[in-house]
């Protein structure tokens, strides 16, 4: 899911905030292919990439087209640019492997379902899936401008820099080996190369994870550099949940029990409170 926001170049250092209003990488839908009149959104298949839509140069990616309707055969196509003849219009069942990938595989893909008995009738076309080919350029450097052990509610800035004059830097966050979010920021150019500062926070436990950055050019947005060395962000801090309960004790007094859940430990306090007269 990829949605990018561009920032204009200024002489002042710029930061893109991630936290209050994250830029989620959600991609625009481009409806340039016509759909058979009988097709509807209810039979639109879903197109996904495994293990990731960001594919290192020379590796493989498996594209999977799933449909909840009666379509068992699918066709895949790449939007824009030169069509890949061994892919375009070639029928397959659910899975299609691109291996090994080169820069020509970078771009936007869709799939649709059909039946051999009625080849003129097709399903709706899937939403677009962006396939990014990384490793086209030398990797940038990713630096944390403060220790990556961050207290809850604080902010941390990650600086992505390169000796190459990239147009754009992309920061990706990962958890359990899966990409959670992607953030894009225009590069700031200087004599030593290019850089961008990503401000994260105020941090919550959801910001914990592994971060990587990539560089790219505006004229080829689906061709990225190799990934930077990753940085692990760990969130520290104390989360306290307090629970109050009352019970009637012997002697006409109310007993108040306070359960204080502090970093997994439960501490109980007991206080006697006189009954109201």
Image (cartoon, rainbow, N blue to C red):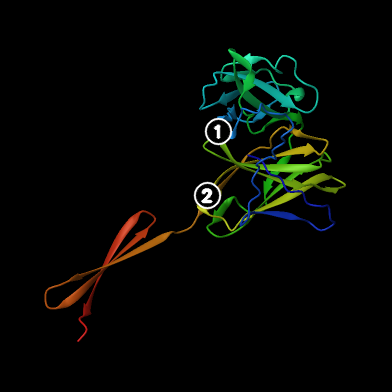
**277 with respect to 166 (left or right):** left
Question: Is residue 223 shown left or right of residue 146?
Answer: right
SS for callout 1: helix
The one of 184 and 239 positioned closer to us in this rendering: 184
Q: In percent of the image, x 56 and y 29: which residue is there?
A: 43
- Residue 120 lies, in percent from the top left, at 65, 18
- Which residue is located at x 31 percent, y 58 percent? 266
Which mark is first along the chain, 2 or 1?
A: 1
Question: In the rendering, at what x and y percent does residue 119 appear?
Answer: 63, 15
The residue tagged with tag 2: helix, strand or loop?
helix
Disc 2 designates what residue? 206
* Outermost residue toward the right in this view: 191
Residue position marked by numbered label 1 in the rendering:
42
Residue that sits furthest to the left in the current view: 251
Residue 111: percent from left, percent from top? 64, 25
In the rendered structure, the answer to whether residue 197 lies left or right of residue 232 reads right
The picture quadrant where one finds residue 11 is: bottom right
Q: Report which quarter residue 80 is drawn in.
A: top right
């Amino acid at each position: 899911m990829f949605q990018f926001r561009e920032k204009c170049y200024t002489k002042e250092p710029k930061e893109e905030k991630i936290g209050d209003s994250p830029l989620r990488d959600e991609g625009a839908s481009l409806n340039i292919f016509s759909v058979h009149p009988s097709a509807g959104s209810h039979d639109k298949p879903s197109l996904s990439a495994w293990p990731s839509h960001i594919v290192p140069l020379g590796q493989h990616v498996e594209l999977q087209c799933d449909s909840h309707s009666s379509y068992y055969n699918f066709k895949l196509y790449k939007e824009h640019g030169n069509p890949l003849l061994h892919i375009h219009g070639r029928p397959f069942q659910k899975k299609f492997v691109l291996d090994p990938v080169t820069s020509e595989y970078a771009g936007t893909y869709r799939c649709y379902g059909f039946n051999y008995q009625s080849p003129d009738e097709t399903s709706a076309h899937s939403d677009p899936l962006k396939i990014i080919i990384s490793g086209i350029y030398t990797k940038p450097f990713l630096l944390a401008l403060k220790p990556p052990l961050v207290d809850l509610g604080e902010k941390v800035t990650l600086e992505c820099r390169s000796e190459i004059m990239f147009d754009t830097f992309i920061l990706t966050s990962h958890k359990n080996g899966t990409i959670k979010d992607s953030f894009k920021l225009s590069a700031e150019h200087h004599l030593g190369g290019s850089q961008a500062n990503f401000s994260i926070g105020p941090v919550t436990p959801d910001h914990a994870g592994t971060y990587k950055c990539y560089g790219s050019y505006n004229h080829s947005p689906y061709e990225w550099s190799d990934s930077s060395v990753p940085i692990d962000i760990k969130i520290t801090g104390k989360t306290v949940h307090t629970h109050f309960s009352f019970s009637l004790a012997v002697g006409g007094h109310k007993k108040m029990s306070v359960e204080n859940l502090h970093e997994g430990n439960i501490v109980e306090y007991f206080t006697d409170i006189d009954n109201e007269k």
